[in-house]
Image (cartoon, rainbow, N blue to C red):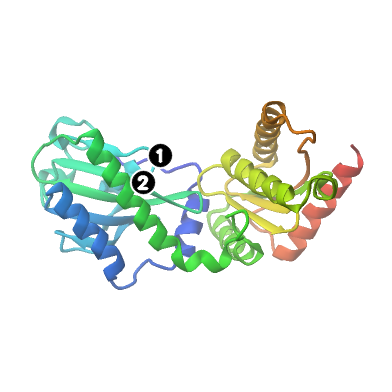
């Protein structure tokens, strides 16, 4: 049996999962409704909303399975969260990863599995999956339906987080940032690993607003938020402090990791500036702070330190 690998961004992923406050809660009709649709649509005996915790697979909705959690080591979903695409196993007995897995050789006798990763706040936290006790195939049209249903689960998981989202850019606002970064730092301290905090400020943003209007400025803010999110890894925390100031917290990272991250963003922005045809160019300055596992500095102080470094770097340009 092949146990699932642990993602490089595990700390950030767990941070996001725990921030949703859905683990070890009662079943809810809003999730059961989706698994009922999946079970009926695909005619499978089992449909699950599965969340991958540190050492277990926990089910927010479990239709056709009379347990609320199993070991992460035997979970198919632990494999599914390692990639963005749906994991399909037509016949587990013919798949070397799962053939001797206890949930294949014994109850519930899994043969067919299809699990679509659930991505919330840039972290793959679990799956919507369908399971059959006999081998089968799944069509492209059926895969699209599974993706659509998974998007509904993601929306439900994210619903109570709306108060922590920035309305314009659709990334975290200051409230959401502080909460998730603090949770992440605590998890990193527990596991004795470092993380980094990156503070961004857009160069010349006021001139864009003054010369091209606030509507254009809003487009720039939304574009920049999208690019820093695109450059990030699963489990990293991205948000807007306010104005043209953004922050990224990178889990399980070093100064070199943060430098590679800002270089990826620079490349994305450079490509955009070349292709956009705009009369102005988007540019940014950044400051990076390394957070050691034994760090006892407050979030506000870390933000201030990164902000100071950012302005120092901006003044050098």
Residue 1 visible: no
Q: Is residue 62 left or right of residue 222?
A: left
Q: Residue at x 39, y 62 (%)?
A: 156
The answer to whether the residue labelled 1 contacts the one labelled 2, judged by CB atoms less than 8 Å apart, is: yes
> Percent x, y for residue 3?
30, 41
Q: On screen, 96 above or below 287?
A: above
User: Is 213 displayed left or right of 70 in the figure?
Assistant: right
Residue found at the far right of this picture: 315
Residue at 32 percent across and 45 percent down: it is 147
Crowdedness near tag 1: few (<14), some (14–19) or many (≥20) residues, C-alpha within 10 Å: few
Which quadrant is home to the C terminus?
top right
In the image, 286: left or right of 314?
A: left
* Percent of width and height locating residue 167: 60, 60
Residue nearer the viewer, 149 or 207:
207
Q: CA distance from mark 1 to mark 2?
A: 6 Å
Q: Which residue is mark 2?
A: 117
The answer to whether residue 61 is left or right of residue 306 is left
301 or 206: which is nearer to us?
206
Q: Position of residue 125 (x, y in %)?
A: 41, 52
Residue annotated with mark 1: 84
Q: Earlier in the sequence, mark 1 or mark 2?
A: 1
Examine the rendering and report whether any part of residue 230 can be seen: yes
Which quadrant holds the N terminus? top left
């Amino acid at each position: 049996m092949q146990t699932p690998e642990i993602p490089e961004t595990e700390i950030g992923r767990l941070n996001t999962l725990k921030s949703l406050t859905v683990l070890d809660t009662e079943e809810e009709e809003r999730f059961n409704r989706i698994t009922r649709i999946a079970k009926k649509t695909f005619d499978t005996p089992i449909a699950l909303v599965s969340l991958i915790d540190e050492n277990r697979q926990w089910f927010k909705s479990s239709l056709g399975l009379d347990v609320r959690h199993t070991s992460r080591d035997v979970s198919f979903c632990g494999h599914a969260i390692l990639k963005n695409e749906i994991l399909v196993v037509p016949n587990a007995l013919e798949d070397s990863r799962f053939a001797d897995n206890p949930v294949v050789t014994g109850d519930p006798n899994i043969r067919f599995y299809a699990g679509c990763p659930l991505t919330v706040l840039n972290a793959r936290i679990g799956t919507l999956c369908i399971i059959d006790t006999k081998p089968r195939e799944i069509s492209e049209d059926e895969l699209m339906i599974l993706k659509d249903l998974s998007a509904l689960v993601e929306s439900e998981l994210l619903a109570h987080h709306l108060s922590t989202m920035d309305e314009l850019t659709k990334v975290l606002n200051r409230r959401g940032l502080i909460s998730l970064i603090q949770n992440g730092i605590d998890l990193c301290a527990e596991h004795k690993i470092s993380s980094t905090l990156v503070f961004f400020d857009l160069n010349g943003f006021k001139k864009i607003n003054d010369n091209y209007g606030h509507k254009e400025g809003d487009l720039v803010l939304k574009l920049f938020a999208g690019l820093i999110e695109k450059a990030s890894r699963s489990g990293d925390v991205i948000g807007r402090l306010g104005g043209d100031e953004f922050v990224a917290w990178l889990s399980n990272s070093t100064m070199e990791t943060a430098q590679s991250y800002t270089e990826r963003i620079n490349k994305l922005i450079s490509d955009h500036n070349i292709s956009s045809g705009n009369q102005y160019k988007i540019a940014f300055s950044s400051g990076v702070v390394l957070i050691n596992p034994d760090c006892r500095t407050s979030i506000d102080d870390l933000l201030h330190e990164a902000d100071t470094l950012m302005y120092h770097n901006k003044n050098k340009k």
